Image (tube, rainbow, N blue to C red):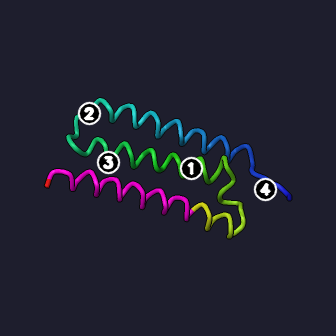
Amino acid sequence: MAQPIVSKKTYALTFGTLLGITALTTLLGFIDMGSLNTVVAVGLAGVKACLIAGFFMHGFYESRTIRIAMIAGVAWFLIMISLTLVDYASRFW
């Protein structure tokens, strides 16, 4: 199977973006935003995960079947997290 040809510039820009988001995450860790801290940190981690899966793992260059499998995996993960949160929230009844 032929591998996609991705330029070094794309890898360098992606790497720089990941470093920038990591620096932003670190800087935001010193700011007290109340309960919004977790939401912002998880959101930035999700963006970093999408960049890694898309560029470094060649997710953007795969066939449609592989993309559907990746989306199904993320959807299943979100279902499991939501069920865990519902269970956790219902324990205080």
Indicate the position of residue 16 as horizontal and vertical percent values: 57, 38
Label ID, residue 39: 3
- Work out how far the residue at label 2 is from the one at label 4, CA to CA, in angstroms: 41 Å
Q: Which residue is mark 4?
A: 4
- The amino acid type, in three-letter code, at marker 1 is Leu
Indicate the position of residue 58 as horizontal and vertical percent values: 69, 53
- The amino acid type, in three-letter code, at marker 3 is Val
Position of 91 with respect to 54 (left or right) is left
User: Of tags 3 and 4, which is closer to the observer?
Assistant: 3
**Mark 3 vs 2, N-terminal side:** 2
- Work out how far the residue at label 3 is from the one at label 1, CA to CA, in angstroms: 19 Å
User: Of tags 3 and 1, which is closer to the observer?
Assistant: 3
- The amino acid type, in three-letter code, at marker 2 is Ile
Label ID, residue 51: 1
Q: Quadrant of residue 66?
A: bottom right
Secondary structure beneath dot 3 equals: helix
Query: Does 32 appear above or below 89?
Result: above
**Mark 4 vs 1, N-terminal side:** 4
Please report the residue visible at 39 percent of the width from the left and 31 percent of the height from the top: 26
The range drawn in magenta is 71-92
Secondary structure beneath dot 4 equals: loop
Q: Relative to the observer, which residue lies in front, 18 or 38? A: 38
Q: Which residue is mark 2?
A: 31
**Quarter of the C terminus within the rendering:** bottom left
Mark 3 crowdedness (10 Å alpha carbons): few <14, some 14-19, many ≥20: few
